[in-house]
Image (cartoon, rainbow, N blue to C red):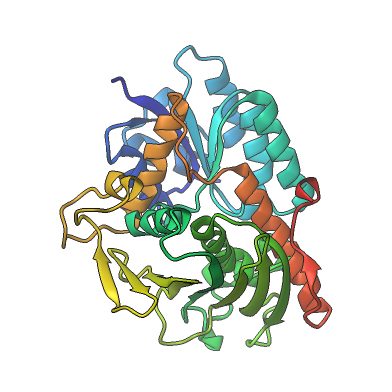
Amino acid sequence: MAKLKWGMIGGGEGSQIGPAHRLGAQADGLFEFTAGALDHRADVGREYARRLGVPADRAYGDWQEMLAGERTRDDRVDLVTVATPNSTHFEITKAFLEAGFNVLCEKPMTMQVDEGEEIVRIAEATGKICAVNYCYSAYPMVRQARAMVAAGEIGKVRLVVTNFSHGHHGDATDADNPRVRWRYDPAMAGVSGQFADCGIHALHMASFICGDAVEKLSADFASTIASRELEDDAMVNFRMARGTVGRLWTSSVAIGRQHGFDIQVFGETGGLRWHSEQPNQLIYTPVGGRTQIIEKGEGGLHEDAQRMSRVSIAHPEGFPLAVANIYCDLADAIRGQVRDGLPDASDGLRSMAAVHAAVASAKADGAWVDARPPMFR
């Protein structure tokens, strides 16, 4: 089967997320890196793209040049990844969708709720794929947890507890580091800092595994380093459409925690736990029974977990391969076989609605706020 053509905007040399996308997109031989506008400095971006093997005539100086160059080609790219600063996601995603391209956008998909609703409408009108890179949902054992919940193996879900808390921004003497500072600057990050950066991964994971949507929430935000305008720690309580109770903590000042993303799901007949630092294992406890460790790659897993397990049992699979699983599902979707669980524009929209709801709640001393985007109410 011929490779699909793939282009990338942003994610240039030194980028944190760029290498994961390049590894993920090409891991299975499904995509060929064909075009790129990789840096806001045109010459730097062109030179880096050429070093990565992109043809010189498709190594672009900026996204506008890439859009103009690709839209008229008979061999235009099949998928465009947007890995630029948050404030540019809406404009770029909108332009490429309207021009008939499939898009994978880094989170957050937009900065505003109305922008997210516009992206959802454009994707529906054009029939093009707009996916959002909630890549943690593509770990095999997360897919196993989702399938177990859907199959009723832990009964009706009562409670979900999730957190994404690390300590890498906990040094107040490093608060002016440009790689840190922008995350707490409203001009660059938007209305929220840590919750919009990491907390929405945890919130999406809760919805993803439970197969349910967040309806309302109550939030408490704190800026524990005084120079920060946006929060670096947040606690969010939420309620889901089918009555599930949710608890979420996210922090960037939890010194001693490294990645710190985990989730626990408690049902009427059992409980599940997954931790990103031990991603090959899903902990399962049936009511009245012994705790069991379900291993990636072992027999008897649900089909989606088996499909996304790439190496044999006891061999680790990490973050770039979770990203690769997103690209596998995208390749299938582009070819007409849509996979359950591929995060799309509606997920991106719900996340941004939750961010704005949490900001409003925190400003109102934790008042409960409707977390649904207006178009889904």
Asked whether residue 16 appears in the rendered view, the answer is no
Across and down, in percent, residue 153 comes to 41, 61
**Farthest residue, direction front:** 288
Left of 230 or right of it: where is 27? left
Total numbered labels placed on residues in the image: 0
Q: Position of residue 22 (x, y in %)?
A: 36, 44
Measured from the top left, where is residue 262 in percent x and y?
A: 44, 72
Left or right of residue 99: residue 164: left
Residue in the image at 62% along x and 43% along y: 345
> Where is 101 relative to 174, above or below?
above
Relative to the observer, which residue lies in front, 339 or 243?
243
Outermost right residue: 364
Which picture quadrant has residue 212? bottom right
Task: Determine the residue positioned at 34% across, 59% down.
Answer: 141
- Nearest the eye: 55 or 237: 237
Residue 373's place in the image compared with 117, above or below, is below
Query: Which residue lies at the image location 45% right of the left edge and 44% below the top edge?
Result: 44
Which percent across, then down, holds residue 306? Answer: 27, 48
Q: Is residue 233 above or below residue 125?
A: below
Q: Is residue 108 at all visible to an observer of this figure? A: yes
> Quadrant of the image for the N terminus?
top left
Q: Residue at x 54, y 49 (%)?
A: 106
State which quadrant residue 332 falls in: top left
| Above-or-below relation of 308 to 315 | above
Q: Residue 150 or 315: which is nearer the viewer? A: 150
